[in-house]
Image (cartoon, grey):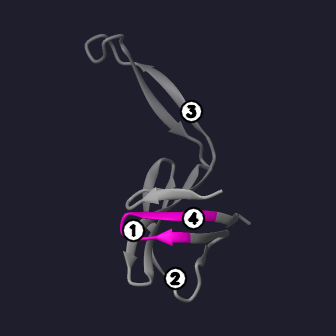
């Protein structure tokens, strides 16, 4: 199945772990009903994203971002470039993606494998 993403949009998301919503009493002066909700991430929570950055000539730019516990991890940010004249199949970690079309607005792709 073909999918489409625009520049700056995550086009592949892999997420493990869990997120729960917890309600805390903060008082009626701090909230209309006195409650505040917050998200609690499990210790093993990890979210990986590939973000489309556009095309220049035959090269597409992709950014890899990784979040742990709900926060971006600077050590896990990577800028990637793929030359589509060499192959329209790109691979990153366990993912293989077939690029159907890419320009400076959108990428049209199919996920060939996630193993």
Name the mark nearer the viewer: 3 or 4: 4
Q: Nearer the viewer, residue 24 or 10?
A: 10
Q: Along the polypeptide, which appears first: circle 3 or circle 4?
A: 3
Mark 1 nearby-residue class (10 Å; few <14, some 14–19, many ≥20): many
Residue 106 image offset from top left, x and y in percent: 43, 63
Q: Which residue is mark 1?
A: 53
How far across and how far down the image is residue 114, in percent? 70, 63
Q: Which residue is mark 3?
A: 20
Mark 1 vs mark 2: give the one in front. Answer: 2
Label 4 crowding class (10 Å Cα cut-off): few <14, some 14-19, many 20+?
many
Question: Can residue 106 be seen by looking at this rendering?
Answer: yes
Q: Residue furthest right?
A: 115
Indicate yes or no whether the magenta region holds residue 92: no
Callout in the foreground (2, 3):
2
Which sits in the foreground, 60 or 101? Answer: 101
Distance of mark 3 from mark 1, alpha carbons? 31 Å
Name the residue at 51% across, 26% down. Answer: 22
Question: Is tag 3's residue or tag 1's residue first in the polypeptide sequence?
Answer: 3
Do the residues bearing badges 3 and 4 touch, measured as CB atoms within 8 Å? no
8 relative position to 41: left or right = left
Q: Which residue is mark 2?
A: 84
* Mark toward the viewer: 4 or 1: 4
108 inside magenta stretch: yes
Q: Specify start and end residues of the magenta stretch as a single range.
A: 100-110
Residue ID at (36%, 69%): 104
């Amino acid at each position: 199945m073909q999918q489409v993403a625009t520049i700056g949009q995550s086009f592949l998301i892999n997420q493990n772990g869990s997120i729960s919503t917890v309600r805390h009493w903060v008082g009626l002066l701090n909230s209309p009903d006195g409650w505040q909700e917050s998200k609690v991430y499990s210790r093993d929570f990890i979210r990986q994203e590939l973000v489309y950055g556009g095309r220049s000539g035959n090269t597409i730019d992709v950014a890899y971002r990784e979040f742990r516990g709900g926060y971006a991890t600077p050590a896990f940010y990577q800028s990637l470039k793929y030359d589509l004249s060499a192959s329209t199949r790109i691979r990153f970690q366990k993912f293989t993606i077939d690029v159907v079309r890419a320009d400076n607005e959108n990428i049209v792709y199919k996920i060939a494998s996630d193993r």
